[in-house]
């Protein structure tokens, strides 16, 4: 089982390309550097891809800068504009794009930052070549899949094809454990205009239930709950499944075809009004619904 976690915010074309051309350090993927607080411990084999999410929605607002004329000074200028936020962004970018066992390191402002690769969704880019369109798309989808409106960390199963068209490894046990089909995510954060899209993959909740992940669910009235992400409705309207009917291989929207990722959740990671805990997804009130949960959150 390959376990990993993401946290991030804003970025741009230039930083993403540059970090993937930086020096590579090999070794075991041991989770995030010390500046993350070391709260997660991860182990790995070559079987499943189970990821934690928690990317701030600010991380979906990228600058869309051109790769042309990039230099270390350009990245330094971008990064030092907001080191705390952009360090967080880089963790997600490198984790999505670069394979496990590799790192990308940057030193600036007297501090050295190291970001661990894990998913390896952009093999060409990670090896030093120019990123393909499919790689830009699937890294964008990966970041969107890890966005969390509430900042709550829950693990998810991430499925699909990488930038080279290879299936992201999964096992039957993973599918059994993460049995709830959640969402699809696609788009392009790095072209300066497209952004990312989220769709529902058949997930329905009762009025008493709530989810710590809402970016693949409609808000009211049928709008995204994770701006700047765009909610598109049902994944099946825009996306094509693989031959095994396990994940989506492509999504077409507004005349453009994208390389998506598909997510699944554990049934135990949904919350219910009356379970004794006032969750971030629940509100006080006098009723028994998630939006008015007297039992868990008390009366307003």
Image (tube, rainbow, N blue to C red):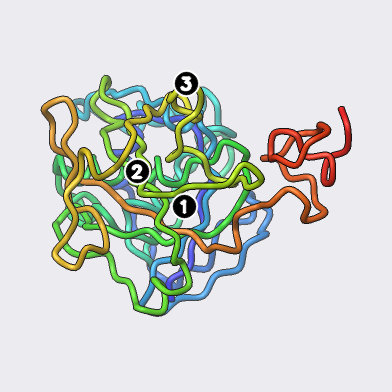
Residue 62, percent from left and from top = 38, 26
Residue 99, percent from left and from top = 32, 62
Q: Earlier in the sequence, mark 3 or mark 1?
A: 1
Q: From mark 3 to mark 1, how far is it between C-alphas?
A: 39 Å
Q: Quadrant of the C terminus?
A: top right
Q: Which residue is mark 2?
A: 19
Q: Which residue is mark 1?
A: 115
The residue depicted at 60 percent of the width and 63 percent of the height is 268
Dot 3, crowdedness within 10 Å: few (<14), some or many (≥20)? few
The residue depicted at 31 percent of the width and 27 percent of the height is 195
Quick check: 293 above or below 162? above
Q: Quadrant of the N terminus?
A: bottom left
Viewer-nearest of labels 2 and 3? 3
Q: Secondary structure at mark 2?
A: helix
Residue 297, percent from left and from top = 83, 40
Q: From mark 1 to mark 2, how far is it between C-alphas?
A: 9 Å
Residue 151, percent from left and from top = 62, 41
Q: Earlier in the sequence, mark 2 or mark 3?
A: 2
Between 14 and 41, the one nearer to me in the picture: 41
Label 2 near label 1: C-beta < 8 Å?
A: yes
Quick check: 79 above or below 7? above
Dot 1, crowdedness within 10 Å: few (<14), some or many (≥20)? many
The label on residue 221 is: 3
* 272 relative position to 78: left or right: right
Q: How many marks?
A: 3
The residue depicted at 49 percent of the width and 52 percent of the height is 114
Between 223 and 156, the one nearer to me in the picture: 223
């Amino acid at each position: 089982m390959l376990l990993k976690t993401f946290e991030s915010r804003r970025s741009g074309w230039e930083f993403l390309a540059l970090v993937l051309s930086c020096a590579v350090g090999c070794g075991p993927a041991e989770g995030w550097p010390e500046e993350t607080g070391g709260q997660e411990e991860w182990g790995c084999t070559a079987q499943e891809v189970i990821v934690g999410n928690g990317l701030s929605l600010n991380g979906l607002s990228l600058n869309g800068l051109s790769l042309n004329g990039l230099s270390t000074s350009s990245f330094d200028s971008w990064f030092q504009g907001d080191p705390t936020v952009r360090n967080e962004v880089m963790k997600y970018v490198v984790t999505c794009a670069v394979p496990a066992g590799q790192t990308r390191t940057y030193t600036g402002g007297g501090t050295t930052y190291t970001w661990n690769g894990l998913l390896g969704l952009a093999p060409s880019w990670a090896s030093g070549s120019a990123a393909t369109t499919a790689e830009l798309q699937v890294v964008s989808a990966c970041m969107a899949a890890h966005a969390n409106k509430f900042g709550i960390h829950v693990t998810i199963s991430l499925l699909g094809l990488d930038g080279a068209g290879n299936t992201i490894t999964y096992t039957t046990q993973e599918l059994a454990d993460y049995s709830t089909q959640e969402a699809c995510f696609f788009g392009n954060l790095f072209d300066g205009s497209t952004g990312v899209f989220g769709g529902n993959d058949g997930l329905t909740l009762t009025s008493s239930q709530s989810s710590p992940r809402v970016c693949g669910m409609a808000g009211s009235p049928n709008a995204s709950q994770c701006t700047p992400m765009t909610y598109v409705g049902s994944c099946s309207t825009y996306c094509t499944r693989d031959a095994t009917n396990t994940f989506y291989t492509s999504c077409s929207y507004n005349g453009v075809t994208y390389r998506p990722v598909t997510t699944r959740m554990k049934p135990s990671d949904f919350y219910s009004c009356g379970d004794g805990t006032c969750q971030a997804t629940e509100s006080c009130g006098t009723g028994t619904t998630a939006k008015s949960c007297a039992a868990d959150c008390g009366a307003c």
